[in-house]
Amino acid sequence: MKKYLRYLGPILITAIFLLAVYLLYNKLKAYSIAQIRESILQISYGRIGLSLVLMVINYMILVGYDWLALKAIHKQLPLPRVALVSFVGQAVSYNFGALLGGTSVRYRFYSAWGFSLTDIVRLVLMLAVTFWVGALGLCGIIFMIAPPVIPDELLRHMPIADVRILGVILFMVACSYLVLCFTVRKPVHIFGKEFVFPAPHIAVAQFIVAGVDIVAAAACMYVLLPGDMGVSFLDFLPSYLMAQVAVVLTHIPGGVGVFELVILHLTHTSHEQMVFAAVLLFRLIYYIIPLLAAAVLLAVYEARQRRHMLREAGRWLSVLSHSIAAYTAFVGGLILLVSSTLPTLPHSVALLTTYLPKSALAVGHFICAFSGAALLFLSYGLERRQARAFKLVVTFLILGIAGALLKGFSWEVALMVSVVLLAVCLARRRFYRSSFFWEEPIPLYWLVGALGALGLIFFLGWAIYHPAWDRAASWGFERPFNASRTLRAFLGIIVALLASWVWRVTLRRRQRRKK
């Protein structure tokens, strides 16, 4: 029983994620990608610049989390080190979750600086306490001062009809922590572990820092919303706060789907596509850009700390190059599939059709999609160090690049796949086995990953094009062009999968007969 219980958490997280994606799709199915793209383009550079400034200010405020946690466990570090671990840890935590990324990053830094495992656990616990004290306290204050309008479908399921009463309860919960910090000075034993409440001034500072952090983060997104929506910052703040709480509770990396769904559900406006566009841009500013900066800082830090180990690291990188190439090729397949599923821009189609017939563009699209699907499975052959798999992967990567350029001159996709091709070719000496992976068993995790990726791509295509499936089924090259060629690509991939499965079964039976 215990063996199966460990899978319960990932299954629940996956189920919540899929449910959130489904509900989000139902919320936005009335809008096209072109409308959302247009909404993004309507956001002025001034508002984007202001959001960037607020993001920088917010990440500076976040340093207070680690600083106060260190004070609470009676540890000291220079401010530059605290700022480094805070920035990298928070950026990774926001994108991959506290458990998957943020805690690991902090363990890497603090353990290298002489902290024991107990110290790190206590510090991480204080970080969580700081967030929840600030979130509950701020939520309570907002609910009491300016109670938000709760949708009727949610209000019916709430045990308390008046939001202000809920605000009083939440604020009292936050204040009870402050009271305990003022009154209890002896260690408290919880589940066999010793817990010491921080000093009163640290507890008050936790409340303030977390509250200011949430307000600054909400402002970072609020400035991206259109000004004519009629939503004030005080009205938007509880929506953002509850979205962040939902992300923390669900443990979904980056809160993908959940954050967007809560924001759209609680932000009362008829311009839902504009809100969604603001959320997408907010993710880029608040999540992706800090993550890229954190990756650079982490790489520089590791290089400076391990200069004497770089040669050894290079040796290990060479040993693992076949695995790196395999996963890189898998990612290359995903890039090609996503590119072939998303609609091609009209001006790109217009430019290419002046020189080529539409049938050539459709062929390029099919090649791009088919190559992406093939790479999801063939990439496992690189993991097995197989020479034939290497040749096939290189072939499909080249075909994918050509298909991306031919289907709509997607030079960005072609460039990314070219980088994947270079990474695979650099490891060519690691592929020396003469066996063919199709004759060997493929592990369940790789099959699930490949088939799951195809399933998500098919769902994305269906979500975008299903209103036009009836017209696309004519197999003509007339409008809707994107829908018809996507349908052909999906059917081609399904047929190829079935044929490959039959071929694989045949090969396996021949092997058994020979034995």
Image (tube, rainbow, N blue to C red):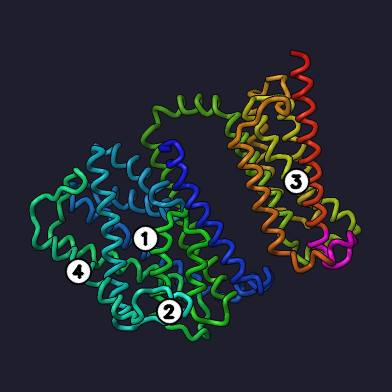
| Residue 20 percent location from the top left of the image | 53, 62
- Residue 374 appears in the figure: yes
Residue under numbered circle 3: 401
Residue under numbered circle 1: 59
Residue under numbered circle 4: 175
Graded by Cα atoms within 10 Å as few (under 14), some (14 to 19) or many (20 or more), the crowding at tag 2 reads some
Quarter of the image for the N terminus: give it: top left
- Residue 406 appears in the figure: no
Q: Which residues are magenta?
A: 471-484
Q: Tell me which residue sits at (54%, 24%) in the image.
A: 319
The residue sitting at the top extreme is 515
Closer to the observer: label 1 or label 2?
2
* Secondary structure under the numbered disc 2 in the rendered image: loop
Q: What amino acid is labelled 1 in the image?
A: Tyr
Graded by Cα atoms within 10 Å as few (under 14), some (14 to 19) or many (20 or more), the crowding at tag 1 reads many
Closer to the observer: label 4 or label 3?
4
In this rendering, is residue 297 above or below 408? above
* Secondary structure under the numbered disc 4 in the rendered image: helix
Residue 150 - label: 2
**Towards the viewer: 342 or 45:** 342
In this rendering, is residue 38 above or below 290? below
Residue 497 - label: none
Quarter of the image for the C terminus: give it: top right
Spatial CA distance of label 3 from label 2 is 49 Å
| Residue 209 percent location from the top left of the image | 27, 65
Q: Quadrant of residue 165?
A: bottom left
Closer to the observer: label 1 or label 4?
4
Spatial CA distance of label 3 from label 1 is 39 Å
